[in-house]
Amino acid sequence: MADWNPWHGCKKFSPGCAHCYVYRRDARYELDAAQVKKNAAFDLPVRKRRDDRYVLQGPDTVWTCFTSDFFLDQADPWRPQAWAMMRERSDLDFFFITKRILRFQEGLPPDWGEGYPNVSIGVTCENQAMADLRLPFFLSLPIRKKLIICEPMLENIDFSSYLGPEIQQVVVGGESGPDSRLMRYEWALAVREQCISHGVHFQFRQTGARFEKDGRVYYIPRVQQIAQARKAGIQWP
């Protein structure tokens, strides 16, 4: 897998943003993560070597814009070119997540049609209110590959009315960092059951730092959070 962050920085937008990992990481270097800037790697997907081969070789999945939000309004001038690079690199699969799916139409390329087949979009829903706000609109959009990302999961969420063949996967996980909010194992199990009922893939990606199971709260180091989630053995199928 490859990473492509065409721009960096973001504005906190909803409850899930409270302890944003980008803000936390930038603070270590005395940087202001609220300052949005175009990165030097902006053209990475189409950058070539001296032998005229692309730097990024396909087929591969490119984790896109994970230090910002692809639909951030400050990025409106740059987004059309980003779309054009995704279109050119049809041999790569681009995946990004967003809290701003309601801005999907801003700068959408005229040839989008039913969606580029090499672009997957995940919408973040950290609580029931955000799920009910974002998912009805998300489901109406012409996107070939749709995922629901519930990280950080801040409460028990009922996704039942939003699950169906158009959703490829639901991913849940807890919050990392020193001020992380609690995630309960029972919440992950409840979403898993919803996914099984609707034939949608389910992934429990990470426990988060504060994780409750069977009435006991565990404090889990960052390096163990993904491994502990995998040990639960509840991915489906």
Image (cartoon, helix red, strand yellow):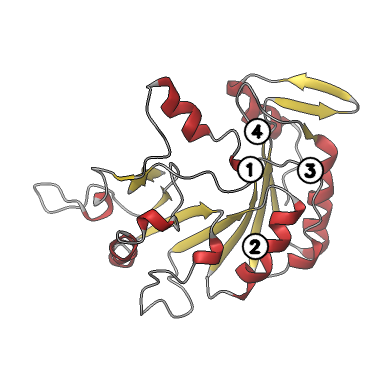
Which of discs 2 and 4 lies nearer the camera? The answer is 2
Please give the residue where the numbered disc 4 appears in the rendered image.
175
Q: Amino acid at mark 4?
A: Glu
Circle on res. 134: 2
Earlier-in-chain disc, 2 versus 4: 2
Instruction: Give the mark nearest the N terminus, 4 or 3.
Output: 3
Spatial distance from mark 1 to mark 2, Cα to Cα? 14 Å
Residue 163, relative to residue 228: is it above or below? below
Residue 85 placement (x, y as % from top left): 29, 62
Residue at the (69%, 27%) spot, across then down: 228
Q: Measure how far apart labels 1 and 4 are at the Cα level.
A: 9 Å
Residue 48 point in image, percent of width and height? 16, 51
Image coordinates of residue 5 in percent, x first then y, are 36, 45
Disc 2/disc 4 C-alpha distance (Å): 20 Å
Measure the alpha-carbon separation of dots 2 and 3. Answer: 16 Å
Within 10 angstroms of label 1, few (less than 14), some, or many (20 or more) residues?
many
Which residue is under mark 3? 155
The residue closer to the viewer here, 153 or 226, is 153
Residue drawn at (91%, 26%), measured in percent from left and top?
215
Q: CA distance from mark 4 to mark 3?
A: 12 Å
Amino acid type at image mark 1: Gly
Per the model, the C-alpha gap separating discs 1 and 3 is 11 Å
Which residue is at 43% across, 20% downward? Answer: 28
Q: Position of residue 102 (x, y in %)?
A: 55, 65
